[in-house]
Amino acid sequence: MKHHALTRLNTFYGVFVMSGRKTSLEKETRTVAKTKNKRYISHPASMTKEVTSVTTPEFEEHLSSLLAAIENQEACTWCGRPSDEVLIDLSTRLCKRCQRWNREEIASLQWQQNNPDLKRKERGVPYELAIQFAQLCREEGQFQSWKGPVTNCQLEDELETLTERLLGERDKLVDTRIIFAQFSDAQRRLLMYLLRRTNLRWIQHRRLDFARDRTRKEFL
Ligand SMILES: [Zn+2]
């Protein structure tokens, strides 16, 4: 069974503070008061007060059209990658890679059915791996949370997931919920779409590693 060689993530999704907003936030200073061993940080008044996102009805309309266009774009029914990234087969609605793993999965399930005694033996590993790989491809297409309303909390979680993948550990970023509150509903959805897409790309580069882990667990 052939596998695509894994390529390593070589790009980073940078800091995504709204342009124009970043400068004003950077200028603000925080008052840090020390009491014994604890440090209390008081947020600038502009960050804690009720905020209204910076937008216009025209821009919101434009964003809604953009999100609808993204949502309606042809995409692989397994991994969810859009047609401007991958070629989608018109009959199966799958990209080439998912088509291949669909075939591998069918053949592997057939092999397991024909060889029940070998299923959990060493000879069964490649077939189980193919089944797990196909399952991963299908799961990727289910990460579609940006299609509905997106909360500040969801954005924060998505960003922390990304930092965990970049830094190797979950790193709590301060004030992200407050910053996300500066965005309108449509802006939050677009932001979630970008973060999700980046996180998905990270997963896609490591499909084989994940499939191996799952296969190993199946054999434990
Ligand atoms: Zn696909």
Image (spheres, rainbow, N blue to C red):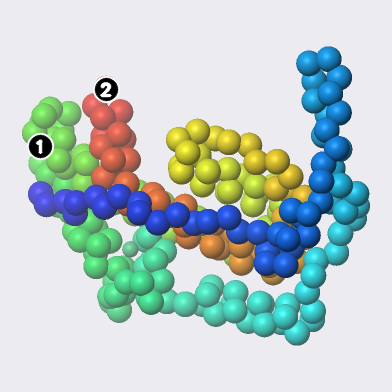
Residue lying at 37% horizontally and 75% vertically, measured from the top left: 83
Side of 97 relative to 194 (left or right): left
Residue 220: assigned label: 2
SS assignment at label 1: loop
Residue 89 drawn at (x, y percent): 28, 75
Q: Nearer the viewer, residue 130 or 176?
A: 176
Badge 1 vs badge 2, beta-carbon distance below 8 Å: no
Q: Marks 1 and 2, how far apart in space?
A: 19 Å
Residue 171 drawn above or below residue 138: above
In terms of sequence position, does the residue under pointer 1 or pointer 2 come before the other? 1
Q: Which residue lies furthest to the top in this view?
A: 36
Side of 84 relative to 49 (left or right): left
Residue 184 drawn at (x, y percent): 75, 66
Query: As shown in the figure, which amino acid type bears the numbered disc 2?
Result: Leu
Residue 50: assigned label: none
From the image, tell me which residue sits under label 1. 115
Residue 87 drawn at (x, y percent): 29, 75
- State yes or no: Cβ of the residue under disc 1 lies below 8 Å from any atom of ligand 1: no
Side of 182 relative to 109 (left or right): right
Side of 36 relative to 173 (left or right): right
Image quadrant, ligand 1: bottom left
Query: As shown in the figure, which amino acid type bears the numbered disc 1?
Result: Asn
How many numbered callouts?
2
Confirm whether residue 131 shows in the render.
no
SS assignment at label 2: loop
Residue lying at 41% horizontally and 71% vertically, measured from the top left: 82
10 Å crowding of disc 2: few (<14), some (14-19), many (20+): few
Residue lying at 58% horizontally and 55% vertically, measured from the top left: 15
